[in-house]
Amino acid sequence: MNRIWLFGDDIDTDQIIPGRYSPYMTSEDALVKYAFIEYRPDFAPNVQEGDIIIAGTNYGCGSSREYAPRALQKCGIAAIIAPSFARIFFRNAINLGLPLFQIDLTDSVYDGEIASLNLEKGELTTTRQVYRLPRPPAFIEDIQAVGGIVEYYQRYQHFPGEKGG
């Protein structure tokens, strides 16, 4: 079982990973080290593979920075669940293969709650309830299934929606 990390509305990319640390992001380990370093210093030392972020509206707003979803992916975050995402964060996360679900669960769960995520079934199970998550469009599921847009292209030699060669 994993834990839920609960966040509010308008979590921006500078809160996820502050831009001033960019010169130090020379490795995947650095991305993990700086995730939420100022906004939530307990995150990086305690996050575990398979943990889930549940947040409020407009998650990932702010600067266009691929470091933000990449850092969360490298921290082992299994998915981010929020009612809405900033467009560029959404695109970057999907391109990286990081699962996103658009539903508001912020009033239904608590920070640190034990939970498990079944991506195939689209279910989040807590100690109190099972939540059905809305499925993303099939092409997004296809990208996520292979680990991201680059991996998709390497496997199929075309992008989703294009005719294969």
Image: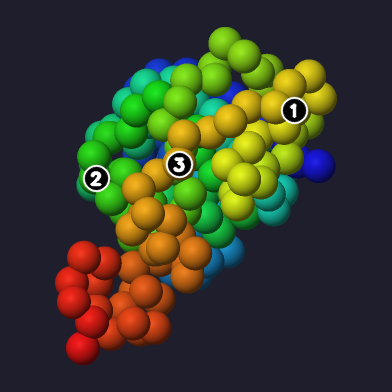
As helix, strand or loop, the secondary structure at mark 3 comes to loop
Q: Residue at x 54, y 20 (%)?
A: 105
User: Closer to the observer: label 3 or label 2?
Assistant: 3
Q: In the rendering, at what x and y percent does residue 88 appear?
A: 24, 45
Which tag, 1 or 2, sits closer to the chain's start?
2
Q: Give the class, few, some or many, for how many residues have Cα within 10 Å of label 1's Cα (few <14, many ≥20).
A: some
Q: Nearer the viewer, residue 46 or 2?
A: 2
Q: Residue at x 62, y 45 (%)?
A: 121
Q: Which residue is mark 1?
A: 126
Q: Is residue 60 left or right of residue 130?
A: left
**Numbered circles on residues, count:** 3
Q: Which mark is residue 88?
A: 2
Q: In the rendering, at what x and y percent does residue 75 appear?
A: 60, 53
Asked which quadrant contains residue 70, the reply is bottom left
Q: Is residue 156 left or right of residue 79?
A: left
- Amino acid type at mark 1: Thr
Please tell me whether residue 92 is drawn above or below residue 6 in the rendered image. Answer: below
- Amino acid type at mark 3: Arg
Q: Which residue is mark 3?
A: 135
